[in-house]
Image (spheres, rainbow, N blue to C red):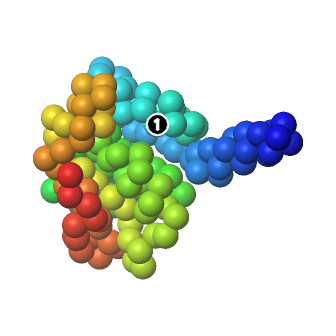
Amino acid sequence: MKKINRLLVMLIALSSFVWAESMTVYKSPTCGCCTEWIAIMEKAGHDVTVIHPYDLQKVKDELGLPRQLGSCHTAVIQDYIFEGHIPEADILSFLANPPENAKGLAVPGMPGKSPGMARPGEKYENFNVVQFSDENKLSLYRRY
């Protein structure tokens, strides 16, 4: 029985390691909701590097983020762009099976019941996660 328990603990630890991602997040140094979203990602085991650029919009433009999808922070993971308050499960799902020609996901604006904006334990609801392509084609990825 002890052998099975140790094996189970090792598998759980390994699965957490496999799914954890390194990400770079570009944000304003004064944005509290961005800090909350980053804390959620770090608590889930992601390695987060935070950069406070002088001109955040310039970074978004250089990355190729469509302006209509803008939010308060931009994460880059494996050359994909993740804009705004996207739930971790959607990021992991996207990375596990990236759609062809996909450039990333976005939660435009700052929905009140999204990760980093919602109160701890509050259900995520009333926002959309939008997928965008290299050609800036938009499609619904998930509705909350």
Name the side, left or right, on which 47 lies relative to 56.
right
Residue 71 x %, y %: 23, 43
Is residue 70 something that shows in the picture? no
Q: Which residue is mark 1?
A: 41
Q: On the image, which quarter does residue 52 sit in?
A: top left
Residue 135 x %, y %: 29, 76
Name the side, left or right, on which 28 lies relative to 92.
left
* Residue 30 vs residue 119, the one in the foreground: 119
In the rendered image, the vertical position of residue 102 relative to residue 68, given as above or below? below
- Rendered-image quadrant of the N terminus: top right
Residue 25 x %, y %: 43, 39
Q: Residue at x 49, y 61 (%)?
A: 95
Q: Residue at x 44, y 28 (%)?
A: 39
Is residue 11 something that shows in the picture? yes
Type of amino acid under label 1: Met
* Residue 62 vs residue 98, the one in the foreground: 98
Q: Residue at x 33, y 58 (%)?
A: 105
In the rendered image, the vertical position of residue 72 relative to residue 59, given as above or below? above
The extreme bottom residue here reads 100
In the rendered image, the vertical position of residue 15 relative to residue 33, given as above or below? below
Residue 101 x %, y %: 40, 77
The extreme front residue here reads 1
In the rendered image, the vertical position of residue 133 relative to residue 69, given as above or below? below
**Element assignment for label 1:** helix
Q: Residue at x 47, y 55 (%)?
A: 92
* Residue 71 vs residue 8, the one in the foreground: 8
